[in-house]
């Protein structure tokens, strides 16, 4: 094994077959955030995530920073990047230029998203008159430009704009028909929501991987705000666990690790093997959970 002194466990602590993880990062705005991001990437890199994805800010606001982060991942690491892309407030030509730029830089995996309404969540989404209308349309556009991998979003609690679960899953089906081969879910804390959603998805004849998105609770108040914005629910038991700890960061971190461990180990026990971590650009909790999942550091391969 290429000189590695340690090995990636091929079995989970529960004695089951290989676990794969992917990690999501956002492009940094400041030098301090840039330092934190790259420290986190370096910490998680030896665990050999299956891929690492980089988000795309609302309305293309991070276009250059997303591109720069993805390019640095390609040039300076042996990680496989997936670049997020939205179609909000942009013409097809503009979006196609970004796709071509990614492909020219060596990107072979895009996470295709519609994005949120420019006027803010809760407002009606209006596609750009000359733009891609939704993530299915964008997926088809990417596939027309290059035969690369496309992942898309999925919503265990349905997307807040979807009239029903059926409409929501119809959209997922449209994204797959357009060429997507993996769905990554919005975060959730109640695993029953994921399994009920999976039943609905499979009943619709969808058989691609629907990878659970796991959000380790780095900051409970921020998590609650995110959840309100994206229509994910926060169970009372989760709020109870963090109650009274506003001034106790050390205990909050232990609770966060326990909550995430409980969630992922239950998913593993119920057959899940792929996980997508919303890292919030912080490595510690994700590293600990990956360790619990049986992942062990592997020595770096020479970057190409
Ligand atoms: P779509 O799949 O196009 O649509 C979402 C829902 O809206 C559908 O389920 C459907 O019911 C309804 N809908 C859409 N079009 C129509 C239509 N024509 N008729 C009827 N109903 C329709 N956002 C960012 O800005 N940047 C990111 O990097 C980013 N990364 C994400 C990664 C993941 C894994 C997830 C889960 C979300 C991410 N988001 C990101 C958030 C995402 O952009 C929002 O949730 C957005 O509101 C919907 O995007 P989508 O790709 O799911 O949209």
Image (cartoon, rainbow, N blue to C red):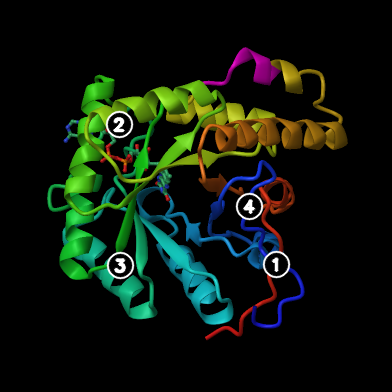
Q: Position of residue 115 (x, y in %)?
A: 34, 44
Q: Position of residue 162 (x, y in %)?
A: 27, 25
For marks 3 and 1 on the same chain, the one whose residue lies earlier in the sequence: 1
Q: Which mark is residue 7?
A: 1
Q: Position of residue 227 (x, y in %)?
A: 52, 28
For marks 4 and 3 on the same chain, the one whose residue lies earlier in the sequence: 4
Q: Residue at x 60, y 65 (%)?
A: 48
- Circle 1 Cα neighbour tier, 10 Å, few/some/many (<14 / 14–19 / ≥20): some
Tell me which segment is drawn in magenta: 233-239
Secondary structure found at label 2: helix
Q: Is residue 34 above or below residue 286?
A: below
Q: Which mark is residue 34?
A: none
Q: Is residue 226 above or below residue 104?
A: above
Secondary structure found at label 4: loop
Q: Is residue 181 left or right of residue 155?
A: left
For marks 3 and 2 on the same chain, the one whose residue lies earlier in the sequence: 3
Q: Residue at x 56, y 28 (%)?
A: 225
Residue that badge 2 annotates: 201
Alpha carbon separation for disc pair 3 and 1: 37 Å
Q: Is residue 26 left or right of residue 195?
A: right
Quarter of the picture containing the N terminus is bottom right
Q: Which mark is residue 98?
A: 3
Q: Position of residue 137 (x, y in %)?
A: 17, 49
Where, by quadrant of the figure, is residue 41 drawn?
A: bottom right
Alpha carbon separation for disc pair 3 and 2: 31 Å
Alpha carbon separation for disc pair 1 and 2: 35 Å
The magenta stretch spans residue 204: no
Residue that badge 4 annotates: 11
């Amino acid at each position: 094994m290429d000189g590695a002194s340690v090995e990636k466990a091929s079995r989970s602590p529960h004695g089951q077959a290989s676990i794969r993880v992917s990690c999501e990062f956002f492009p940094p705005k400041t030098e301090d955030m840039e330092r934190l991001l790259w420290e986190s990437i370096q910490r998680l890199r030896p665990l050999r995530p299956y891929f690492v994805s980089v988000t795309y800010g609302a309305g293309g606001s991070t276009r250059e920073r997303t591109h720069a982060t993805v390019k640095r991942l390609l040039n300076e690491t042996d990680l496989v990047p997936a670049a997020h892309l939205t179609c909000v407030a942009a013409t097809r030509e503009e979006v196609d230029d970004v796709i071509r730029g990614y492909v020219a830089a060596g990107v072979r995996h895009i996470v295709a998203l519609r994005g949120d309404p420019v006027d803010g969540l809760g407002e009606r989404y209006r596609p750009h008159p000359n733009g891609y209308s939704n993530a299915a349309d964008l997926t088809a556009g990417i596939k027309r430009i290059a035969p690369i991998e496309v992942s898309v979003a999925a919503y265990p609690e349905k997307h807040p704009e979807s009239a029903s679960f059926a409409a929501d899953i119809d959209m997922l089906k449209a994204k797959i028909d357009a060429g997507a081969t993996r769905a990554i879910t919005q975060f959730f804390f109640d695993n029953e929501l994921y399994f009920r959603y999976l039943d609905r998805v499979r009943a619709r004849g969808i058989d691609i991987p629907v990878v659970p998105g796991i959000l380790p609770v780095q900051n409970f108040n921020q998590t609650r705000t995110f959840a309100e914005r994206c229509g994910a629910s926060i169970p009372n038991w989760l709020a109870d666990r963090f109650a009274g700890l506003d001034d106790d960061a050390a205990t909050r971190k232990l609770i966060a690790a326990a909550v995430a461990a409980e969630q992922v180990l239950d998913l593993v026990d119920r057959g899940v093997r792929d996980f997508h971590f919303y890292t919030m650009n912080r490595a510690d909790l994700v590293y600990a959970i990956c360790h619990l999942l049986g992942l062990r550091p592997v020595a770096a391969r020479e970057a190409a």
